């Protein structure tokens, strides 16, 4: 701190300090993020104490790194803040937690602090590199899915015989939703999360640009995935229940609902969270205000539950029809059975199996890998092994071969004709002989 001409203090900003050795990477942003969290903690605590009387033995406190709300007796667990790791990269392992013990007389004052200072156990924040393993698994699996999804989307849009069929319209939009999620995952991870990411500073600033990108990826595109999975189940159920084929259906209502409704929910979420919980790292983690995050959780769980119900109904309908008349359109029902089993990976059953997250590295890597490979499995089922797609490709290839053969034959005939014309136009040999 320096004194001015009139005795006023002048503080040198951190980024202008000339120190040897220099401050750690992005130290200024880390300090600002920590101070912002402290300010939010104090403001929240004052608001709570102003509106209600709290008889908890342990009052709300800021320990220098983390904010702990008032608590009853027991162990209080809090997610580790990202700024304690420095600015080299963004930690995305949300299973790292700090712990603080609340006793009947107040926060724990252990003997190793002389019985005078509150103590928070941050050993859980310094665990192994689970986050890096999950990130690597995500980058590899989502890359594989994107590689398979791009040709699949192209084929379903390019092949004319199936382009306007209702079922393939649904398939195409589901693939596009999975593709967009994979592209956004790879983009946000590269820009913000990996070591020395070019825009990692925006994470510490809680910049609106990264908040917008992560909201699109983690909220909007996740909801569109569930919406199109539900659309697949609803349409298949309608197809089997009514036994009517609507080849001319444009699926406009499906498009409006499955793309528009998630957009509306995400917009409301973005505004509500900005007003109630505008802290953290670009909203990568879930909101600390539970009801805000349930705006995303509730529609997702509802879609998965309805999908499970419809899958069960589809199987029951198929069994009844096959038992009544096993010779009636058996081929069509085999296709429908295949479509029913196709829904198992299509509606994301792995997310039901991993809805409770264990703090185990192998479990978390498996969970991330299954989510990342969902686009690969869906593209493999609805495109690369689909009989209609294969038949269309075979017809196109045979037509291409026939056109190529016909073109070669035409060129050969033209070449022969041109050769004949040259022979006819050539003068007799005797005209060149001079006597």
Image (cartoon, rainbow, N blue to C red):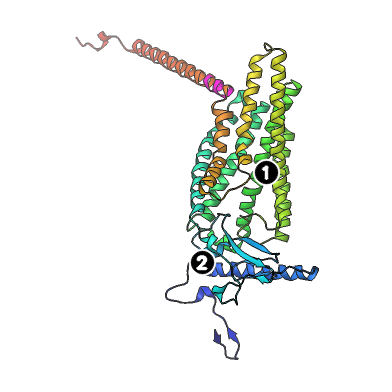
Q: Quadrant of the C terminus?
A: top left
Question: Of 427 and 356, which appears nearest the observer?
Answer: 356
Residue 2 is a magenta residue: no
The label shown at residue 152 is none
Dot 1: few (<14), some (14–19), or many (≥20) neighbours within 10 Å?
Answer: many
Q: Is residue 93 visible?
A: yes
Can you give x and y, in whole percent of width and height, for residue 397 in the image? Answer: 50, 21
Q: Nearer the viewer, residue 257 or 297?
A: 297
Q: Residue at x 67, y 14 (%)?
A: 329
Q: Secondary structure at mark 2?
A: loop
Instruction: Using the rendered image of the protein, determine whether residue 250 is visible from the camera's viewpoint.
Output: no
Residue 393 lies in the magenta stretch: yes
| Front-most of residues 329 and 6 | 329
Label 2 crowd (10 A; few <14 / some 14-19 / many >=20): some
The kind of secondary structure the magenta stretch mainly shows is helix
The numbered mark at residue 223 is 1
Instruction: Examine the image and state in which quarter residue 270 appears.
Output: bottom right
Towards the viewer: 320 or 202? 320
Q: Position of residue 129 (x, y in %)?
A: 48, 54
Residue most extreme to the bottom: 6
Secondary structure of residue under mark 1: helix
Using the numbered discs, state the Cα–Cα distance from disc 2 to disc 1 in whole angstroms: 34 Å
**Quadrant that contains the N terminus:** bottom right
First in sequence: mark 2 vs mark 1: 2
Number of marks in picture = 2
Residue at x 63%, y 56% (from the top left corner): 283
In the rendered structure, find residue 26 and report the number of the disc placed on it.
2
Residue 407 pos. (x, y %): 46, 18
Asked whether disc 2 touches disc 1, contact meaning CB atoms under 8 Å apart, the reply is no
Q: Is residue 241 above or below residue 97?
A: above
Q: In the image, which residues are magenta?
A: 388-394
């Amino acid at each position: 701190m320096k004194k001015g001409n009139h005795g006023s203090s002048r503080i040198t900003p951190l980024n202008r300090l000339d120190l040897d050795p220099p401050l750690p990477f992005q130290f200024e942003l880390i300090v600002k993020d920590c101070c912002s969290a402290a300010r939010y903690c104090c403001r929240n605590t004052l608001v709570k104490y102003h509106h209600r009387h709290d008889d908890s033995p342990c009052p709300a406190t800021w320990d220098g790194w983390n904010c702990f709300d008032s608590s009853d007796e027991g162990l209080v667990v809090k997610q580790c803040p990202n700024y304690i790791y420095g600015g080299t990269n963004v930690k995305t392992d949300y299973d790292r937690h700090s712990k603080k013990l609340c006793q009947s007389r107040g926060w724990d004052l252990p003997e190793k602090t002389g019985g005078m200072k509150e103590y928070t156990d941050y050993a859980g924040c310094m665990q192994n590199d689970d986050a890096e393993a999950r990130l690597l698994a995500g980058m590899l699996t989502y890359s594989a899915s994107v590689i398979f999804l791009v040709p699949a989307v192209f084929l379903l849009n390019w092949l004319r015989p199936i382009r306007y069929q209702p079922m393939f319209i649904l398939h195409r939009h589901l693939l596009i939703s999975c593709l967009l999620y994979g592209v956004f995952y790879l983009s946000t991870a590269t820009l913000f999360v990996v070591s020395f990411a070019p825009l990692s500073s925006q994470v510490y600033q809680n910049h609106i640009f990264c908040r917008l990108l992560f909201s699109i990826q983690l909220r909007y595109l996740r909801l569109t995935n569930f919406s199109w999975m539900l659309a697949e189940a609803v349409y298949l159920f309608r197809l089997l229940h009514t036994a009517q084929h609507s080849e001319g259906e444009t699926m406009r209502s499906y498009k409006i609902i499955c793309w528009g409704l998630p957009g509306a929910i995400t917009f409301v979420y973005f505004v509500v969270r900005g007003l109630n919980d505008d802290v953290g790292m670009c909203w990568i983690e879930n909101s600390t205000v539970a009801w805000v995050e349930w705006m995303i959780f509730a529609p997702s769980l509802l879609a998965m539950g309805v999908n499970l119900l419809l899958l069960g109904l589809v199987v029951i309908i198929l069994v009844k029809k096959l038992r009544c008349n096993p010779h009636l359109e058996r081929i069509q029902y085999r296709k429908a059975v295949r479509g029913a089993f196709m829904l198992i990976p299509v509606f994301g059953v792995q997310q039901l199996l991993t809805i409770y997250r264990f703090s185990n590295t192998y479990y978390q890597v498996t969970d991330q890998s299954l989510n990342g490979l969902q686009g690969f499995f869906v593209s493999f089922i609805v495109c690369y092994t689909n009989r209609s797609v294969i038949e269309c490709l075979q017809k196109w290839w045979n037509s291409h071969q026939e056109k190529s053969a016909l073109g070669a034959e035409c060129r050969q005939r033209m070449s022969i004709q041109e050769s004949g014309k040259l022979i006819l136009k050539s003068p007799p040999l005797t005209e060149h002989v001079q006597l």
